[in-house]
Amino acid sequence: MKFSEDADSKHLMISAYGDDFITVNERRHALPAMLGGEQPPRPWPVTSAAALTPADLDLLLASDPEIVIIGCGPRQHFLPPELLHHVMRHGIGCEVMTTPSACRTWNIIVSEGRRVAAGLLAPAPE
């Protein structure tokens, strides 16, 4: 899906997404990817929401976000309580949703000037 983009934006904005990619500030990036702070998207070494570990979440926490978004692919998944607690004990909120929803939510939170980190997964191979 293609979004319209604010051409004057100095923030990282997701302008499009597909099953295996996101487009951020007119540059295409493969999924899985992580975003946070002012750094461009980087590969995220996670294959599925079920495979997430505290170390994977620590990669997102390193950018000092107020909120962490996990895009778990095309279907909603819930993280085990211990993983949610791992993020929340730092005083940081954590939301888990489909990757398309996470892309849209990223843009909203960034446009509000809030610090956010996101881990975005592609559909798991079958």
Image: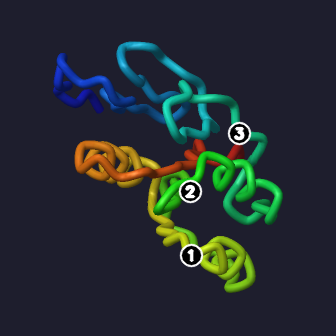
Relative to the observer, which residue lies in front, 37 or 4? 37
| Secondary-structure class at tag 3 | loop
| CB-based contact (under 8 Å), mark 3 and mark 2 | no
Q: CA distance from mark 1 to mark 2?
A: 22 Å
The earlier-in-sequence mark between 1 and 3 is 3
* Nearest-to-viewer mark from 1 and 2: 1
**Gap in angstroms between the C-alphas marked 1 and 3:** 23 Å
> Hey, what amino acid is under mark 3?
Trp
Mark carried by residue 72: 2
> Could you tell me if the residues under marks 1 and 2 are in contact, i.e. CB atoms within 8 Å?
no
Q: Secondary structure at mark 2?
A: loop
Residue under the image location 18 percent in, 17 percent down: 7
Rendered image: mark on residue 91 = 1
Residue 65 left/right relative to 12: right
Q: Residue 36 placed where, x, y %?
A: 54, 41
Q: Residue at x 38, y 44 (%)?
A: 103
Q: Pick the residue in front: 99 or 67.
A: 67
Instruction: Tell me the quarter of the picture where residue 122 sits.
Output: top right
Q: Secondary structure at mark 1?
A: loop
Q: Which mark is residue 121?
A: none
Query: Measured along the vertical axis of the image, is residue 31 above or below residue 69?
Result: above
Residue occupied by mark 3? 44
CA neighbours of label 1 inside 10 A, class few (<14), some (14 to 19), many (20+): few
| Residue kind at label 2, given as amino acid type | Cys
Tell me which corner region of the image, top left, top right, bottom left or bottom right, holds residue 1: top left
